[in-house]
């Protein structure tokens, strides 16, 4: 998975904030620059998809700046 951050990188562009492995993998990533949230799903090892998460109005889910600051201070 090439879009995952390097674990040695102190300020990764994308941070995984949720992971679940039941029938395949589901993960949520946050872009630490824009705050936009992405949903990633892999079914077995044959298919995967990545999409922007949207709210009820169809606008991207954006993590507030004060929460993003926590990712940069780790």
Image (cartoon, helix red, strand yellow):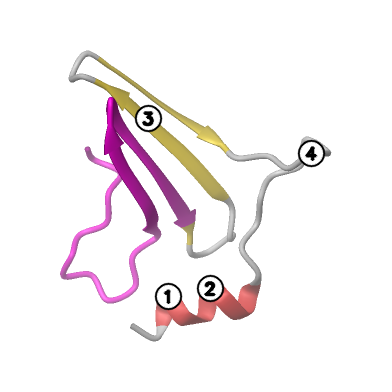
Q: Quadrant of residue 44?
A: top left
Would you name the residue on which mark 2 appears? 68
Quadrant occupied by the N terminus: top left
Counting residues from the N terminus, which is met first, the one under dot 2 or under dot 3?
A: 3
Give the residues in magenta: 1-30
- Distance Cα–Cα, label 4 vs label 3: 20 Å
**Looking at the image, is mark 2 or mark 3 nearer the viewer?**
3
Q: Residues within 10 Å of mark 4 (few under 14, many from 20)?
A: few
- Distance Cα–Cα, label 1 vs label 3: 23 Å
Would you name the residue on which mark 1 appears? 71
Residue shown at the point (33%, 83%) measured from the top left: 74
- Distance Cα–Cα, label 2 vs label 1: 5 Å
- The image shows residue 14 at horizontal and vertical percentages of 39, 56
Between residue 49 and residue 19, name the one nearer to us.
19
Between residue 32 and residue 20, name the one nearer to us.
20
- The image shows residue 60 at horizontal and vertical percentages of 69, 44
């Amino acid at each position: 998975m090439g879009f995952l951050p390097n674990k040695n990188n102190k300020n990764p562009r994308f941070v995984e904030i949720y992971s679940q492995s039941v029938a395949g993998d589901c993960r949520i990533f946050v872009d630490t620059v824009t705050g936009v949230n992405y949903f990633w799903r892999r079914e077995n090892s044959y298919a995967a998809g990545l999409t922007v998460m949207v709210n009820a109005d169809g606008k991207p889910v954006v993590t507030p700046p004060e929460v993003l600051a926590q990712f940069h201070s780790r």
